Amino acid sequence: MQFTAQQLSVLLNGTVIGDPNTKVHDVAKIEEAKEGQLSFIANPKYTSYIYTTDASILIVNDDFLIEKEVKPTLIKVPNAYSAFTTLLEKYQSLVQRKVGIEAPSYIEESATIGEKPYIGAFAYIGKNAHIGKNVQLHPHVYIGDNVKIGDNTTLYTGVKVYHDCEIGNDCIVHANAVIGGDGFGFAPQSDGSYQKIPQLGKVIVKDKVEIGANTTIDRATMGVTLIEEGVKLDNLVQIAHNVVIGEHTVIASQSGVSGSTKIGKHCILAGQVGIIGHLEIADYTIIGAQSGVSNSVKEPNTTVLGSPIMDLRHARRVYVTYRNLPQLAKKVNDLEKRIKELSANSDKSHQ
């Protein structure tokens, strides 16, 4: 599939510098691009590649100044990184989108399927499920009874969506994610055993959410586990029952959020963050990697890290001290020896 510089500039509302009829059929990094490929530059440290790359078309920022002759045709846009991302999304949708219902697959008669679906082999769609328009259900996807899947949403192979859960429009759920499994609820008994607490709620995932491979989102004990619009969850993330995650929050791999915790909007949780239950994390909070969160973060725009978490400025001082512990320990040992020597000399002088 080929595109000209003129076609791409129309799509991106950009300005062509060079031959508008230059064609590309693939994309590549600027330092590796060959003739017939499209690339971009947004980071100034790669500027030198503009004059050496073999790419046929480059997307650059409007403020880029040409200092000498360039081989590629340029497309100037307000934000090169964002424009290139838009193109990749379009390219991916053209290449990967399928249409049709493969056999064998099972669809309950009471289920409703929107226009232009793709339902892969061995997929299962339960009673009264509602599947929107242009939905992609890859092989071995399980959709439970009464599940709702919005328009233009893609579920990759092996995704499981338990009964009564809802996923919005324009979402992506990667392989083997589980949405709506039981929350970790057990009541201790007098004999030391545990009795399972029925999990009667559900999960609601709003629009434009992306959920990574092998991520799990547990259904609420009662009510809803809620993932708000625009949230991005990495692979191997655990979201427990009755958790609420605010709009456009990002959570990196191997992080876990315990039950009934509420995370605000536009937060960032780095890898391996652990949050205990029933806390509140304010909007625009940043939590550093491997942090253990045992208290609520009440002030917005706060950055914390460590286990237990500390304010960023305090944490930096702590870590400086921590790195210097061997030297500090040596100083203490030297001082103790010196004190003993002084004490011994003092005792001798008094004899």
Image: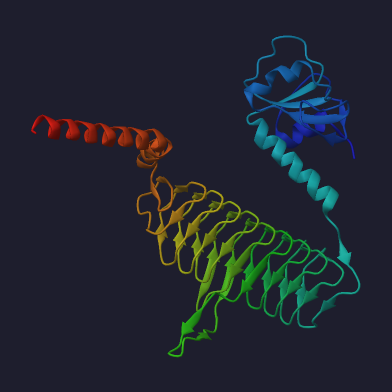
Q: Residue 88 at what x, y percent from top left? A: 75, 41
Q: As drawn, which residue projects farthest toward the left?
A: 350
Q: With 282 as the anchor, is 18 left or right in this view? A: right
As drawn, 154 above or below 181: above
Q: In which quarter of the image is residue 173?
A: bottom right
As drawn, 119 above or below 112: above
Q: Residue at x 63, y 54 (%)?
A: 234
Query: Looking at the figure, which quarter contains the N terminus?
Result: top right
Query: Looking at the figure, which quarter contains the C terminus?
Result: top left
Q: As drawn, which residue projects farthest toward the bottom?
A: 191
**Residue 56 or residue 179, whichever sits in front:** 179
Q: With 318 as the anchor, is 239 left or right in this view? A: right
**Residue 257 or residue 262, whichever sits in front:** 257
Q: Residue 172 at what x, y percent from top left? A: 69, 57
As drawn, 91 above or below 347: below
**Residue 167 or residue 297, whichever sits in front:** 297
Q: In which quarter of the image is residue 141?
A: bottom right
As drawn, 190 above or below 129: below
Q: Which residue is drawn at 75% across and 80% down?
A: 126
